[in-house]
């Protein structure tokens, strides 16, 4: 981690000196993986108990609908993480609920999270939304690394991990990512001076989505998409909006997706249109990059290389061309809402406290697994195919796991201070062989962006706007961030 930071710092320094050096040849040692630090703790499997799902407590809910109406109540819309937290407060660290036809088990205790994850098989299963599967069937579209299951997923994952998770490979993108951050800083300054009031930047969350799209685009296509230009390509803005809508409607269609499809409801139609736009724009960008690569080969011009990432998928893996398109599309869309919201919440919190920590807003507040075999969890026999919700948000606010849980105490994450923290109480990128494949990319993007923003601006709270976070699969910022950017 220290090496990664020093590599990042070097690039930041270079960009401050107004130059950018290519350091692709530099060998960097592997960033210490959090996974390797996580040794199994003494978890009791309690296999001698006979408790089953029937013995597990939880909210009763309504006939047929179960607890679904609770989440669609006006006051609770977009706040599933809060509702889950309230259920945990009432029913304890493990409860069950029926969401329409599906029974879910929710857990919010690091020991139980560890117990679950230590029992994962070769192909961990994070449940894809039913609406995604319905869309793919409708358009005869293959699943990619985010949505595939079993052996298919494992093949994709193996092909992608080499480029995306090896620190040495990720470091090669530091300079281009840093150039993207330079554009972001310029854009913030421009919007603040020309369109903002009182040093604020209107619609900042959308600008941060553009930054995230530009940044992941730079990795996947090794090209600048122009998202942070005053006149950006309409198509990429369409893509960003479509990603937001796809995640929002995917969340809304979490229960009864099939029924929405049959009735042709508005969320279903929006969902389909959003996916169509996502695939259309991504395909165009991939085509452009592949054409460039071909042109370089045809004219034997070594300066025209196209994307090293796509080149690797084409020549270094056995993925078919269709699989390359699908996986690249899923990586592109996964990199937008996640990194942008993480950066936005960090900016917001920095403005309120320079010693801020972003864990207060884990952007994936609820992760999930489907059991691939019968298992014992916290003394309960959980059958195969049960959906388990891992409630990071609830754990983050639990005094049992974090003292003064509601306060900003960034020092708690210093190595010297964090020895009493159970690592399974905070897994922002998930865990195990199915953890976030973009983790190293996201960390590098965020270090660069936060360092450069802090170097350029003094952040202060603004009264003009209000933060209204909404859960739309990813915990998102809403329309505005109440922050003032003062020049340093
Ligand atoms: C701060 C930013 C990010 C956060 C907090 C985040 C978080 C997560 C989490 C919690 C998961 C589920 C892991 C699990 O089930 O154990 C995940 C999966 C995934 N993420 Fe990220 N992510 C971020 C950025 C990115 C970026 C930039 C990319 C694109 C390169 C990306 C691509 C993916 C993909 C493709 C998956 C599915 C992996 C699989 O199923 O094998 N993420 N992410």
Image (cartoon, rainbow, N blue to C red):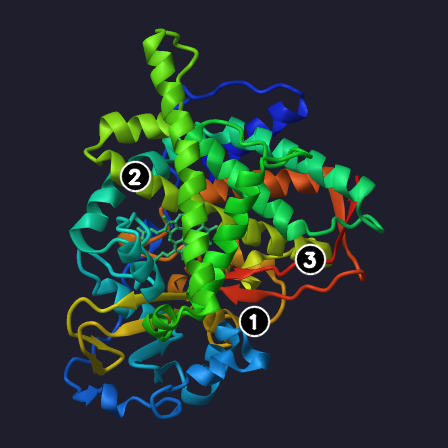
Q: Earlier in the sequence, mark 2 or mark 3?
A: 2
Q: Which residue is mark 2?
A: 160
Q: Nearer the viewer, mark 1 or mark 2?
A: 2
Q: CB of residue at label 2: within 8 Å of ligand 1? A: yes
81 over 131 or under it: above or below: below
Judged left or right of residue 464, residue 400 is left
Q: Earlier in the sequence, mark 1 or mark 2?
A: 2
Q: Which residue is mark 1?
A: 405
Which residue appears at 37% of the width and 57% of the height? Answer: 430
**Which numbered disc covers residue 345?**
none
Q: In the picture shown, does residue 209 fall above or below 356?
A: above
Tell me if 241 is positioned left or right of 15 in this view.
left
Q: Nearer the viewer, mark 2 or mark 3?
A: 3
Residue that label 3 marks: 480
Residue 192 shown left or right of residue 11 in the figure: right
Where in the figure is residue 98, as x and y percent of width and height? 34, 84
- Using the image, determine if residue 234 lies above or below residue 47: above
- Expressed as whole percent of the image width and height from the top left, the position of residue 270 reads 47, 60
C-alpha gap between disc 1 and disc 2: 37 Å
Distance from disc 2 to disc 3, alpha carbons, whole Å, reads: 34 Å
Q: Position of residue 268 (x, y in %)?
A: 42, 65
**Residue depicted at 42% across the width and 34% down the height:** 284
What residue is shown at x 29% (from left), y 37% (from top)?
Answer: 324
Visible in this render: residue 364?
no
Location of residue 311 by image quarter:
top left
């Amino acid at each position: 981690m220290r090496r990664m930071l020093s590599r990042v710092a070097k690039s930041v320094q270079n960009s401050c000196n107004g130059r950018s050096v290519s350091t692709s040849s530099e060998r960097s040692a592997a960033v210490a993986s959090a996974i390797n630090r996580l040794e199994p703790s003494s978890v009791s499997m309690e296999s001698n108990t006979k408790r089953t799902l029937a013995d597990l407590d939880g909210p009763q809910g309504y006939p047929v609908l179960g607890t679904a109406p609770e989440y669609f109540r006006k006051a609770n819309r977009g706040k599933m993480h809060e509702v889950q937290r309230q259920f945990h407060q009432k029913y304890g660290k493990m409860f069950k609920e029926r969401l329409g036809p599906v029974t879910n088990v929710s857990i919010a205790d690091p020991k139980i999270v560890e117990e679950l994850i230590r029992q994962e098989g070769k192909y961990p299963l994070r449940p894809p939304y039913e609406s995604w599967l319905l869309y793919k069937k409708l358009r005869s579209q293959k699943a990619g690394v985010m949505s595939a299951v079993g052996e298919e997923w494992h093949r994709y994952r193996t092909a992608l991990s080499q480029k995306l998770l090896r620190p040495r490979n990720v470091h090669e993108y530091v300079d281009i990512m840093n150039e993207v951050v330079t554009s972001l800083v310029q854009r913030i300054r421009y919007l603040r001076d020309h369109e903002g009031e009182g040093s604020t930047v209107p619609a900042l969350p959308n600008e941060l989505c553009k930054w995230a799209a530009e940044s992941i685009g730079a990795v996947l296509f090794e090209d600048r998409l122009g998202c942070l230009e005053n006149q950006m390509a309409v198509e990429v803005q369409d893509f960003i909006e479509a990603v937001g809508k796809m995640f929002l409607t995917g969340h809304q269609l979490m229960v009864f997706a099939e029924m929405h499809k049959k009735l042709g409801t508005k969320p279903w139609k929006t969902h389909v249109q959003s996916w169509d736009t996502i695939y259309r724009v991504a395909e165009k960008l991939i085509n452009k990059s592949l054409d460039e690569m071909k042109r370089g080969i045809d004219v034997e011009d070594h300066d025209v290389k196209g994307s090293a990432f796509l080149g690797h998928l084409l020549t270094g893996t056995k993925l078919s061309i269709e699989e390359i398109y699908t996986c690249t599309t899923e990586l592109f869309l996964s990199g937008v809402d996640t990194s942008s919201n993480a950066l936005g919440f960090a900016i917001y919190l920095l403005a309120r406290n320079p010693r801020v920590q972003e864990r207060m807003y884990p952007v994936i507040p609820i992760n999930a697994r489907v059991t691939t075999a019968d298992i014992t969890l916290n003394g309960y026999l959980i059958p195969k195919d049960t959906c388990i919700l891992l409630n990071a948000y609830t754990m983050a606010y639990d005094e049992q796991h974090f003292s003064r849980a509601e306060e900003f105490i960034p020092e708690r994450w210093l190595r010297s201070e964090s020895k009493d923290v159970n690592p399974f109480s905070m897994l922002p990128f998930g865990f195990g062989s199915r953890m976030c494949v973009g983790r190293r990319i996201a960390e590098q993007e965020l270090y660069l962006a936060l360092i450069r923003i802090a170097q350029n601006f003094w952040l202060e709270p603004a009264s003009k706007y209000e933060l209204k976070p909404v859960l739309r699969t990813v915990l998102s910022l809403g329309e505005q961030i109440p922050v003032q950017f003062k020049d340093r």
